[in-house]
Amino acid sequence: MGSSAWPPRMGVSVHVAGLQSGMALWALGLMWQYLALPDGVQRTAQVLAIVGLYAIFASILLAALWGASRSLPIAGAGHQASQLREAVVTVLIAGGSLAITVAVALVLWGLCAWKA
């Protein structure tokens, strides 16, 4: 198949990623009042969480539109995009994953500091 056909599993993945990202941001917002972090660290965690989750969503959306499957082999099975498009999707999903991981670590650190 070419990159012009929308991979159905990838479409479901985009939908699920959007829902999960929204719920994650909502949950982080509920926890925010309990964080004991310096203002700069809190702002960093906010930015990383928002940018990270949007980057993940954008990468899966682009993978679906372009038919990229290197980073998401199960959802994109049978599809392949150009090397540039595959690289863009890979960089976005890896960067977003790293950003949200750091954000969650900062939030957990802030929650532990608040409890202590």
Image (spheres, rainbow, N blue to C red):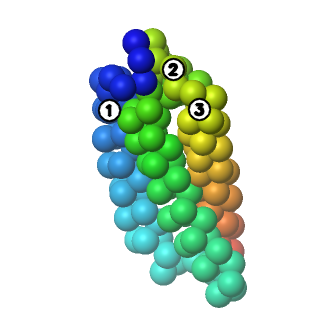
- Which is nearer the eye, 111 or 76? 76
Please name which of the two marks, 2 or 1, marks the residue nearer to the observer.
2
Question: Count of labels shown?
Answer: 3
Q: Earlier in the sequence, mark 3 or mark 2?
A: 2
State the residue position of label 2. 80
* Three-letter code, disc 3: Glu
User: Disc 3 marks which residue?
Assistant: 86
- Whether the residues at callouts 3 and 2 have beta carbons within 8 Å, the answer is yes
Residue kind at label 1, given as amino acid type: Gly
Q: Residues within 10 Å of mark 3 (few under 14, many from 20)?
A: many
Q: Does label 2 or label 1 sit earlier along the sequence?
A: 1
Say above or below: 96 vs 10.
below
Disc 1 is placed on an element classified as helix
Label 1 vs label 3: CA separation?
Answer: 17 Å
- Does residue 115 appear in the picture of this structure? no
Quadrant in which the N terminus appears: top left
Residue on which the image places disc 1: 11
Give the Cα distance between marks 2 and 1: 15 Å
Residue at coordinates 49% horizontally, 75% vertically from top-left? 32
Q: Is 102 rendered above or below residue 76?
A: below
Question: Is residue 51 found left or right of 66 in the rendered image?
Answer: right
User: Looking at the picture, how far across and down is residue 3, in whole percent?
Assistant: 42, 24
The mark lying in front, picked from 1 and 3, is: 3
Q: Tell me whether circle 1 and circle 3 mark residues in contact (CB < 8 Å).
A: no
Q: Position of residue 5 (x, y in %)?
A: 33, 23
Going by the image, does 23 lie left or right of 71?
left
